[in-house]
Image: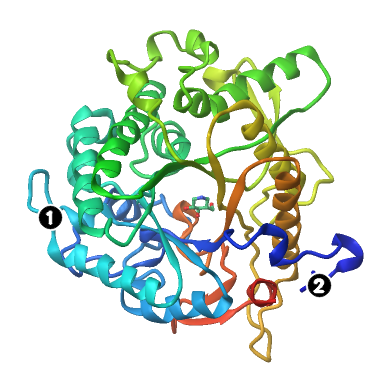
């Protein structure tokens, strides 16, 4: 199957990526499930955040979302119809434990167990994320991720879930985008729990990584043949100008955006800059933490959306940098730059600089506000083009030697886009949130044609 614009992009076929390549879509529990008070689920920090006036742009919440809690068989059938062989989703921690020290909620475990059976029956390899931002509120009430007991609670949660589901699930992702958990949740306050504090954000960041490190051996012990990793949001960084100050700003920005995570996970510790700049705001690191964080993993999940352009700015927070948006670049409706070459460069860089094992693009997608036309079709040509060009970028990275073994489009469905509510559509299938009807967009049709050859 060739791309829709072969004259622009050249031919691309599924077979270019080999038989073992994982082709999927990614989703997350809070963004699609709904069923917020069903099946023994208790509130998460996102339920609380949604109830706080002014936090969500359209004042919406995740109570119903895509109603995936009830409609998952149809959604899995949709995924199967696309020709996917994998599906990435997250488990809602508040569905599994209703209080610290409580017994696991059997109904919650059964929900995911049934869904996993449904995936396997449809030829979809399950890829499970344990934490995609929906911390139980009762844990936030005792300090959330700043409290090391939350680290212990996460490891217990990982233990229960992997013991119960590990007979069928082999691919485990501990955390999704710890940068967002830490920074959006605790520095800029855009995400739940909405805190704005440098030391809190840095401690959260450290404790989240620690919980990853401590959970990995537990998952391995529970799951024969487990493959365990973490999914990071990573961004190529470029200078706003050729000045020395801006080029130095790139080094600092990259050191926190990317290397803070990569260096720590692959045994180099946190980069000395910005650590030295943090002073008293630096995280408390207990003996043995860094060794735990650097536990061996099997793969790295790379979530790629856009590169960042930065300039030096003495007022620009602890990094003294500001992200700028140069004119004249192609952008999605969210303002994110469309830069497929950044994905190739990023994957090649990770392969060159880190011993990360296999790489999976665990998220990549674009936000455009397309709606059905009079005939009911959703002609999202910009999203289709984004998908085509980024698949070319993945193939280019493989040709450069990066061991990229899978691609998961974000997202299967339009969904709850965090503080933007339902105003930002990332799905390759359109969701009418009034009727819950799903309509495959042109991008989804292209993906299906490509996958089915
Ligand atoms: O919707 C999010 C997802 O939850 C995490 N990665 C980025 C996506 C788009 O913003």
**Residue 227, horizontal then vertical, whole percent:** 40, 47
Q: Which residue is mark 1?
A: 104
Is there any visible trace of residue 212 in the rendered image? yes
Q: Is residue 411 left or right of residue 102?
A: right
Q: Quadrant of residue 309?
A: top right
Q: Please give the label number shown on residue 4.
A: 2
Front one among 365 and 418:
365
Residue farthest right in this picture: 7
CB atoms at circles 2 and 1 under 8 Å apart? no
Tell me what residue is drawn at x 64 percent, y 54 percent.
Answer: 334
Front one among 290 and 273:
290
Asked which secondary structure carries label 2, the reply is loop
User: Compared to 223, does 13 lie above or below?
Assistant: below
**Residue 5, horizontal then vertical, whole percent:** 85, 69
Q: Is residue 117 left or right of residue 202?
A: left
Q: Quadrant of residue 246?
A: top right
Q: Earlier in the sequence, mark 2 or mark 1?
A: 2
Tell me what residue is drawn at x 76 percent, y 74 percent.
Answer: 1
User: Compared to 93, does 450 lie above or below?
Assistant: below
User: Compared to 288, does 137 lie above or below?
Assistant: below
Binning the other alpha carbons within 10 Å of mark 2 as few (below 14), some (14 to 19) or many (20 upward) gives some
Tell me what residue is drawn at x 46 percent, y 21 percent.
Answer: 267
Whether disc 2's CB lies below 8 Å from ligand 1 is answered: no
Asked which secondary structure carries label 1, the reply is loop
- The C terminus is located in which quarter? bottom right
User: Compared to 425, does 207 lie above or below?
Assistant: above
């Amino acid at each position: 199957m060739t791309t829709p614009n072969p004259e622009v992009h050249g031919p691309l076929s599924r077979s270019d990526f080999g038989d073992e390549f994982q082709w999927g879509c990614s989703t997350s529990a809070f963004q699609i499930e709904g069923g917020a008070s069903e099946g023994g689920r208790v509130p998460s920090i996102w339920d609380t955040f949604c109830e706080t006036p002014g936090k969500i742009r359209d004042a919406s919440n995740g109570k119903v979302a895509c109603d995936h809690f009830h409609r998952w068989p149809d959604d899995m059938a949709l995924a199967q119809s696309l020709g996917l062989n994998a599906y990435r989703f997250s488990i809602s921690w508040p569905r599994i434990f209703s209080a610290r020290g409580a017994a696991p909620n059997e109904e919650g475990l059964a929900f995911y167990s049934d869904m996993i059976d449904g995936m396997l029956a449809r030829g979809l390899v399950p890829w499970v994320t344990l934490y995609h931002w929906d911390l139980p509120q009762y844990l936030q009430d005792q300090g959330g991720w700043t409290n090391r007991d939350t680290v212990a609670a996460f490891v217990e949660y990982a233990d229960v879930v992997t013991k119960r589901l590990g007979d069928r699930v082999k691919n485990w992702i501990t955390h999704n985008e710890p940068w967002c958990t830490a920074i959006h949740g605790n520095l800029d306050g855009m995400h739940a729990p909405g805190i704005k504090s440098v030391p809190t954000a840095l401690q959260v960041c450290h404790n989240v990584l620690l919980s990853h490190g401590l959970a990995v051996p537990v998952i391995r012990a529970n799951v024969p043949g487990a493959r365990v990793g973490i999914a990071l949001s990573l961004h190529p960084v470029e200078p706003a100008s050729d000045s020395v100050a801006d080029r130095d700003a790139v080094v600092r920005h990259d050191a926190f955006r990317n290397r803070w995570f990569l260096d720590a996970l692959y045994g180099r510790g946190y980069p000395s800059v910005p650590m030295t700049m943090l002073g008293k705001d630096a995280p408390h690191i207990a003996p043995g933490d860094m060794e735990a964080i650097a536990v061996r993993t099997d793969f790295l999940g790379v979530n790629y959306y856009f590169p960042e352009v930065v300039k030096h700015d003495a007022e620009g927070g602890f990094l003294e940098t500001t992200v700028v948006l140069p004119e004249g670049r192609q952008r999605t409706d969210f303002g994110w730059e469309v830069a497929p070459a950044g994905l190739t460069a990023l994957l090649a860089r990770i392969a060159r600089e880190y011993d990360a094992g296999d790489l999976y693009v665990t998220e990549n997608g674009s936000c455009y506000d397309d709606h059905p036309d009079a005939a009911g079709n959703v002609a999202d040509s910009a999203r289709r083009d984004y998908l085509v060009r980024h698949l070319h970028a993945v193939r280019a990275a493989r040709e450069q030697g990066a061991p990229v073994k899978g691609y998961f489009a974000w997202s299967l469905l339009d969904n709850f886009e965090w503080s933007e509510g339902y105003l930002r559509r990332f799905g390759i299938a359109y969701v009418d949130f009034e009727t819950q009807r799903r309509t495959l967009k042109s991008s989804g049709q292209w993906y299906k044609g490509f996958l089915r050859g």
